[in-house]
Every structure is written in structure tokens, then in C-alpha cells.
Amino acid sequence: MSGQGPGPRDGVPAADGRGGGSGRLYGVGLGPGDPELVTVKAARLIGAADVVAFHAARHGRSVARALAEPYLRPGQVEELLVYPVTTEGTDHPGGYQGAIDEFYEAAAARLAAHLDAGRDVVVLAEGDPFFYGSYMHMHKRLAHRYPTEVVPGVTSVSGAAAAVGRPLVERDEVLTLLPGTLPADRLAAELARTDSAAVLKLGRTFPQVRAAFEAAGVLDRALYVERATSDRQRTLPLAEVDPGSVPYFSLALLPSPLTGPAPAPVPPGSAGAPAGEVVVVGLGPGARAWTTPEAADALAAADDLVGYGPYLDRVAVNPRQRRHPSDNRVEAERAAHALQLARSGRRVAVVSSGDPGVFAMAAAVLEVAERPEFAGVPVRVVPGLTAAQAVAARAGAPLGHDFAVLSLSDVRKPWDVVVDRLRHAAAADLVIALYNPRSRARPHQLAEARQVLLETRAPGTVVVVGRDVGGPEERVTVTTLGELDPGTVDMRCLVLVGSSQTRVGPSGAVWTPRTLEGPRPSHPSQARGGARDGATDGGP
């Protein structure tokens, strides 16, 4: 648009220095026929304008003015621009085109007189001003001379698609817009090679348009829409239309075969019902930004959400979905419930914090899914950012080299197995991520684990404790193995124990070199810096 700026009567000069004394020209789209489809901006500009201009055939009745009438105010100047010809012949020396061009020049001169006098002029346009509209002829003649703005409107094509309840295109399909005034062979060729089409300017052109659809072999799926969205709207198959009844304000639609009417819904569990599935979804450690788009899609598509109550609370409520919260200690029962729902045709999301495959629900669901009664129920796993990654990122890059991940919980394995694995990981000089480090039921085990590590690790080994990482109480503490106080750690924490190579840089960032440099004991002085607070929302 040229010289776009604030609304009428703002006194702001055009951006190119054409002078602030002139009025402003607005081409305003009114939509396809429903007065309520006039945009808020269009209504405001119509009511504020000094001059409202609109086109009409020689009978003088303007569809555009009728749409704008609710927004007009007393005292406005109305400029009726009457076409000298529409479809009939003319004795003008230049023929039809000469008569129309002369009309547009005269109409532009009438509007220019108002603009020169400092009056703001709104030119009304059915649909969109730049979509087969008469306004564009005023724009070409005036926009380079006056500050101008074009306000888009809902097109007749959009209105027609809504009227028949059929999307026009999807994915990579092509929509072709065609004027009905094209030769029939050209129309047929275009219709035969496109996915979807809209043919406008019907009326007297309808017989050749219908013939083009038939020649292209697509008449059987073509639709007809007359006066879309208005109180005189009419829709029916194109093949059933009486050519003598077709007005100019109508169009023919060729929706894509992919957008055909949806099949009738099939009750879950009945023959032909879609198969249900279980998707085990990782939310990440806390912050919503750490939930992947794939996980968000799986949650949005689900009919049922199953999970530990606090984890379900992190998923936005959707009244379409059923939620099934349960205690954290009934994983097998939770998995069986999810599989039973899926077997009946439901789409079920089992919700985990962090990554569902890391000490979480994915293994539990897959284990229960092996029971004979759940044969054929599909299960898939959607990964999530796990707590070790989140804490490591907050600290720097302590997982920059080989590392091990261990759970200190002995609920599902004996404590002596935990200790044995811990000794081997420590002896291998791996960075170790400790999940489930200390609970009220197991207050002593982190202290015992620390003593096991000190058998082979120096007291100055760097340790990172992340608490509620991603949550409102996030706290990241950098200390050493010798100075680690197990009493400050709970189940909302994750503990990272560095290798002999892990160090604290001058900036306080913790990192483990990717290149092994040989034994490099850590020193307590390297680990100063204490707690560092951050911000996200949920713990490991």
C-alpha cells in the first residue's frame, strides 16, 4: 500500500512528502455478503470517512452500500459510481473497453476532487478490494497521488467454502482461481490439471463453465454457491443448476477429493472402529518449553490421559478428554488401565515426567503389553528431555564425556546391586547421574553411596545438585564429593558426580572435556560458587 498510516482525520502527512493537506483514500473490503463479516477496521473507517463511494449498475442499487449501511452516519457525502455498461453492447467509439476506461477516469477525477479538498474517501468493495474488484481501478489511478490504504476483506471464495462446509485444499494441494469469462477449452484444461478450483464471474457465462467442468471430467464433484453468506445464499451440486437462474454473484467450486465429507463416526469397539493406541509421553523435567512439539501433539490427540496425579496436573485441561490420575506406586495397574482403554478403541496418552524411557512408565507399559489379553494393542513412546540433561545444561556441560545413569532406589532391585554398579561406574571414572537419590523411606542411602564413591574418587570431585530444575523453586548447587551434605537432598533433586576430568571454569560453569587427558583430580577450590538460582518449572 502507498503512504499507509493512521486512520482518517489524523493530520499526518504522507510518508513521501506529498503533503498532509490532502485527504486519504481507503479501499475497504466488505466481505462476501453477511454484514457481520465486515471487519472491525472496515466498519470504523466507513463510519469516520467524509466521503463514501460505491459502484452500481445502471439500476443504481449497490450491493456494497447495502453491506456498509449499518456503519454509515448522517452527514456523509455519498458518491454513487454508476457503470455506463455491464454486459450489454455500447456505441462508444472505443467499444466496451473504451466506455469502461472513460468511466473509471471520470470516477477517479470525482474522488480526487474530494481528496484535494482534504476529505477522506472510503471506496467500498464487495469481498476483497484487490480480488476481481472495481476498487483496483481507482487505486491504479489515485494511489500514487494520495496517501492510500487498502483494508482486506473476506473473499467470496472463502465464503463459498464455508457455505458448503468443504475445505478447498490441504497439505501440498494447489487451488486455482479462474474467471468464468475464459474460453471453455482453457477452463477445461485448467480444471483437469488442478487439485481444487473456484470459478467466478458466472451469470451469462454459466453454460460454458458447466461444459468446461464436464469436459474436464469433474462435474460430478463440482458445487455451486450463490450469494455466499448472505440471507439469499443457495448451494447445490453444479450439475443440478438451472442456467437461467444463475446471477453474477455466484461461483462454482471444485473441492479436492481429499476434502470430501467425513465418514459417519463409528462407535469405539464396533466393527470398523479405528484401533486405539497407547502413547507413552515424556513431558520433560518441568518447564512447558521443555515439552517437545511431538509430545504436545500426542497429548492433544488423546481421548484419555493416564498418569501420576502431579504429572497430569502439568497438562492443560481439555474438557473433551478424560483424566485418570493414580498413585506413583501402581505403575503396573496404571499401564494395564491404559491398555484396556486402548483395546476398546480409545487413544490413550500415558504421561511421564522427564523421559518416559528413563526410570519411568515406558518400560512398565511395554512389560504389561506383553500379556496375551493386550496382543495387538499398539504402543509407542514419545521421548522427552530427561532430568540429567536439564541439570547438566543449567550447570554447564558436565556430561561432555562418557557418563552413567543410576537410580539409588532399591524398590525394584536389591541395594547390594546398586552398590556394586556404583563401584564399577566410579572405578571406570565415568560421570554419574544419580536419580531418586534420597527419600523419606530411604534417608541413609545417598550417604552410603557417597562413601562408596569416595573409595575411588577424590574428595575434590565436582558434584552438581539440581533441585526442582524447571520449576519455581529451582536451585543448582555446585560442591564437591567431600563436602556434599546428603541431608540437603530429596526426591526432587538429581545429583551429578563428576569424573576426574570434570572441572569448574572461571565463569563457574561445570564441564567435562571431550578429550581424555589422563587422571586429573578435582580440587575443592575449583568447586566454589555455591548455589545458583534459575527459573523453569518441575523437578527431576
Image (spheres, grey):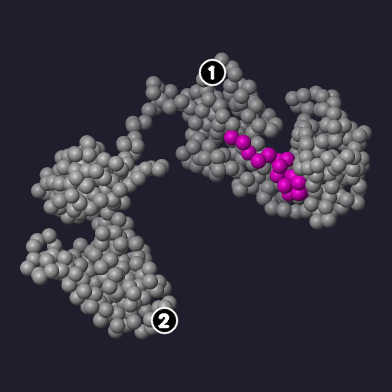
The residue range painted magenta reads 382-397
Q: Quadrant of residue 120?
A: bottom left
State which quarter of the image contains the N terminus: bottom left
**Residue 17 marker:** 2
Horizontal side, residue 12 vs residue 119: left or right = right
Write the residue at 21% across / 71% down.
104
| Residue 468 in view (yes/no) | no
Q: Percent x, y for residue 534?
A: 72, 53
x then y, percent, for residue 348? 53, 31
Q: Tell which tag, 2 or 1, sits nearer the viewer.
A: 2
Quarter of the image with the C terminus is top right
Which residue sits furthest top?
372
* Residue designated by label 1: 375
Q: Are marks 2 and 1 in contact (CB under 8 Å)?
A: no
Mark 1 is surrounded, within 10 Å at the Cα level, by few (under 14), some (14 to 19) or many (20 or more) other residues, namely few
Badge 1 amino acid: Ala
Distance from disc 2 to disc 1, alpha carbons, whole Å, reads 76 Å
Instruction: Residue 396: say if magenta.
Output: yes
Whole-percent x, y for residue 8 in the image: 36, 76
* Left or right: 420 as drawn, with respect to 112: right
Q: Nearer the viewer, residue 504 or 347?
A: 504
**Residue 530 counted in the magenta span:** no
Q: Secondary structure at mark 2?
A: loop
Mark 2 belongs to which amino acid?
Gly
Tell me the SS state at disc 1: loop
Dot 2 or dot 1: first in sequence order is 2
Q: Identify which residue, 354 or 327, lies in the foreground.
A: 354
Q: Residue at x 68, y 47 (%)?
A: 470
Q: What residue do we see at 56% from left, 15% from top?
A: 372
